[in-house]
Image (tube, rainbow, N blue to C red):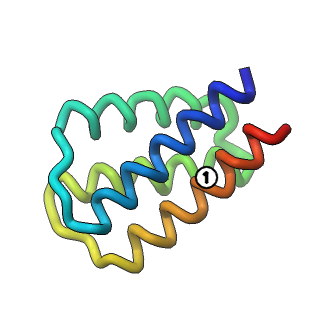
Amino acid sequence: MVKLLGTVDIIAAVLLLILALGAEVPAVVLAVVSIFLAAKASISLIDIGGITDTAVIILIIMSFFAVLPFWILLIGAGLIGIKGLMSLLA
């Protein structure tokens, strides 16, 4: 189960990197990843993992409406990517 949740984090990191590079991502993909992250974040909203998931959800939703700076998306991708790698290695 932990490896599945880590995979969702890795997918979100790749998605944020794609957005940071300026490529177009279908809205359906953004919505599906956001829903999975919201479900995962609702497991534990109190710890840093849930807070990180919530921050990435906010970044993805904001990218629907505006072009976010490269460095913000890169930081978000790095945080969720490291979290995902740690989950995969656990």
**Quadrant of image for the C terminus:** top right
Q: Tell me: residue 31, above or below residue 76.
A: above
| Residue shown at 44% from the left, 71% from the top | 74
Q: Position of residue 79 (x, y in %)?
A: 60, 62
Q: Position of residue 13 (x, y in %)?
A: 48, 52
For the residue carrying disc 1, how many other residues have a C-alpha within 10 Å: few (<14), some (14-19), or many (20+)? some
Circle 1 SS class: helix
51 left or right of 47? left
Quadrant assignment, res 70: bottom left
Read off the residue under disc 1: 51
Q: Position of residue 45 (x, y in %)?
A: 65, 41
**Quadrant of image for the N terminus:** top right
| Residue shown at 47% from the left, 34% from the top | 38
Q: Tell me: residue 28, above or below residue 63.
A: above
| Residue shown at 65% from the left, 37% from the top | 6
Quadrant assignment, res 28: top left
Q: Position of residue 47 (x, y in %)?
A: 74, 48
9 left or right of 46? left
